[in-house]
Image: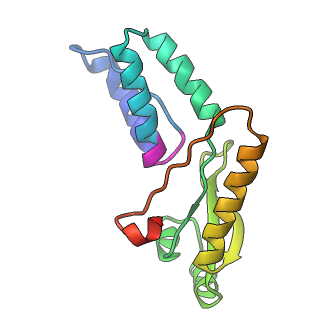
Amino acid sequence: SGFYNSLTQIAPSIDKIKVIPYDSKITVKLMGYMAIQASKMAALGRTPEQILTYLDGLRATIDELFVVDDLQNLVRGGRLSNASAFIGGILKIKPLLTFDDKSNEIVAFEKIRSRKKALKRVEELFAAAREKADYPLRALVINANDPKAGN
């Protein structure tokens, strides 16, 4: 990310504390979860290397899916053309989005008609992942300051 790159450049010039830039490769809610886990480990006296190893393992098991109501935000961010947003709006398409591990960009995982169906699909995918996983899963819900959207 841009923030990670900027922090990597200025970290060597910071004298009073050790700054270790870390690219979570995810969005805010999960990034916050990782920061809390790192903080707890630091409070327990874990070394930076132990914390980074843990975060790398956590990052490898994280999968992020999300749905947006307004396709115009994707147009403004350069991730969707105006024509696609127009057609998507008319057809009430709600793309199910995720991060591409290779490019670190947001990509459409599936295109689903209607918000209700898109959210149902997220639930189905989580249930399928829960059945396959041999470790506990955690679901985090982001509602973008719209509490009804998170229900």
- Residue at image point 49% right, 76% down: 70
- Residue 93 figure quarter: bottom right
Residue 66, given in percent of the width and then of the height, sits at: 57, 60
> Can residue 82 be spotted in the picture?
yes
Q: Is residue 14 left or right of residue 96?
A: left
Q: Nearer the viewer, residue 71 or 37?
A: 37
Q: Is residue 23 left or right of residue 145?
A: right
Number of marks? 0
Q: Is residue 76 left or right of residue 91?
A: left
Q: Which residues are magenta?
A: 25-30
Residue 144, given in percent of the width and then of the height, sits at: 39, 63
For this orientation, the residue located farthest to the right is 132
Q: Nearer the viewer, residue 127 or 84?
A: 127
Give the answer, above or below, for where 53 lies relative to 141. above
- Residue at image point 40% right, 32% down: 35
Q: Is residue 50 left or right of residue 43?
A: right
State how the image is colored. Answer: rainbow
For this orientation, the residue located farthest to the left is 16
Residue 82, given in percent of the width and then of the height, sits at: 56, 80
Residue 110 lies in the magenta-colored region: no
Residue 15, given in percent of the width and then of the height, sits at: 23, 14
Give the answer, above or below, for where 133 lies relative to 114. above
> Can residue 108 be spotted in the picture?
no
Q: Nearer the viewer, residue 87 or 12?
A: 87
- Residue at image point 65% right, 46% down: 103
- Residue at image point 26% right, 15% down: 17
